[in-house]
Amino acid sequence: MAKKNADAPKYSKETYKYWYESMQLQRKFEEKCGQLYGMQKIKGFCHLYIGQEACSSGSKSALIEGDKYITAYRDHGIPLALGTSPNAIMAELYGKITGASKGKGGSMHIFDKEVGFVGGHGIVGAQIPMGAGLAFAEKYKKTGNVSITYFGDGATRQGALHEAFNMAMTWKLPAIFVVENNGYAMGTSVARTSNVTELYKIGEAYDMPSEPVDAMNVEAVHEAVSRAAARARAGEGPTFLEFRTYRYRGHSMSDPQKYRSKEEVEAYKDRDPIEQVKHTILTHNILTQAELDEIDAKIKVQVQESVDFAEASPFPDKSEAYKDVYVEENYPFIEE
C-alpha cells in the first residue's frame, strides 16, 4: 500500500480527477508497451515511465497553454499528460506513418507541436541547451510563456548543462530545469558518479533558485512548478528543481536491474504517486470508487484502441526518408 496523505485536499475536484486519470493513463499505456515489446511488436530502444508519472501530470497542472516542454528519451508520459493522442504515440512506437513523428522517430523521439511538446531526445543532455533556447525565444517574442526542460540524473554530469545554466541565469530566461532523479544513470548510482549527491545544489553555483521535490507526490510537483513558473513569468529568471522520483522498471527493456534490490523497489512502490492521489480522492469523497472504476475502464479502452490503431496503420513508404529533413522541400542536395 502507498503511503497515505491524510491532509485536507487543497485543489479542485477537476484537478484531482485530472491527476488520477492522467497518471493512470500513463501507467496503463506503459504497461501495455512493456507487453508489446516482449511480443516484438515494438522494436529498438524503449524506456518506460512507470513510477514517474507525477513528474509529468503535476507539471502540466501547474503550467498554461503555450508553455513548452522538452525531455530526454523516456518520453511517452509527458505527451500523454499534455493530451497527445495515445493512438499517435503507440503508432510511433510501432514505426507507422500515423505516428506522432510519422514513424521515423520511434520510442525516443515523440513530438507534438500542438500541445507544446518539443520532443524526446536521444543524446544525453542535448535537450538542456535546447530548453534554454526555447525560453530565449519566448522572452524574445515577449509571449509570457515558459519552457520546462526535463533530464535524468546522469545528464547533470554533462558540460552542456553548466553552459545552459550560466546562460539562463545571465539572461534571466523564463526556464524551468528539472532533473528527474530516479537514483540511477542507467545502472550507475548517483553516488558513484557525482561528488554532489543532492543534485539541486548544482544550481546554487549559478545563484539559481533551486530546491528538492518529493516527485512521488503529484501535489508537491504541482506546487514546486507553480512557484518556478511564477518567478519565470515575473522576469526573475530560471529555477532548477530536483524531482526525487523512481522508475519501477529497468532503464530500458534490456536492463536486468542487478544494481538494485527488490526491497528498494518495493519501498518506493509503497509511496506510489497514483495510490497517494487515489487515497486523497477517496478519503475526502472527491470521487467515488465507482467513478474511479469508470475512469479505469475508459483508460483500458483507450489503450486497446491505440494498439488496434497502430496494428492497422501502414508503415511509411520509402520515399518518406527524404521528407521532413529540411524546411525547404526542394533542398538542392536531396536526390531521389
Image (cartoon, helix red, strand yellow):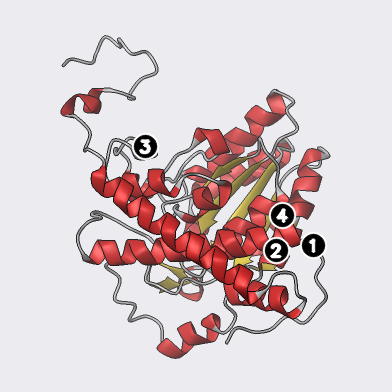
- Provide the secondary structure element on which disc 3 rests: loop
Amino acid type, residue under disc 2 in the picture: Tyr
Q: Quadrant of the C terminus?
A: top left
Residue at left 74%, top 70%? 286
Q: Nearer the viewer, mark 1 or mark 4?
A: 1
Q: CA distance from mark 1 to mark 4?
A: 15 Å
Point out which mark residue 11 bears: 1
The residue where tag 2 is placed is 16
Q: Can you give x and y, in whole percent of width and height, for residue 94 in the image?
A: 27, 48
Q: Amino acid at mark 4?
A: Val
Question: Quick check: marks 1 and 2 in contact, CB under 8 Å?
Answer: yes
Q: Is residue 153 visible?
A: no
- Quote the CA–CA distance across marks 1 and 3: 35 Å
Q: Which residue is mark 3?
A: 101
**146 relative to 211, above or below:** above
Q: Are marks 3 and 2 in contact (CB under 8 Å)?
A: no
Label 4 belongs to which residue?
225
> Disc 4 to disc 3, how far (Cα)?
28 Å
First-in-chain label (1 vs 3): 1
N-term mark: 1 or 2: 1
Image location (x, y in percent) of residue 21: 58, 61
**Residue type highlighted by circle 1:** Tyr
Relative placement, left or right, of 119 versus 222 is left
Q: Amino acid at mark 3?
A: Ser
Q: Residue at x 81, y 42 (%)?
A: 236
Q: CA distance from mark 1 to mark 2?
A: 7 Å
For mark 2, give the secondary structure.
Answer: helix
Q: Secondary structure at mark 1?
A: loop
> How many numbered tags mark residues here?
4
The answer to whether mark 1 and mark 4 are in CB contact below 8 A is: no
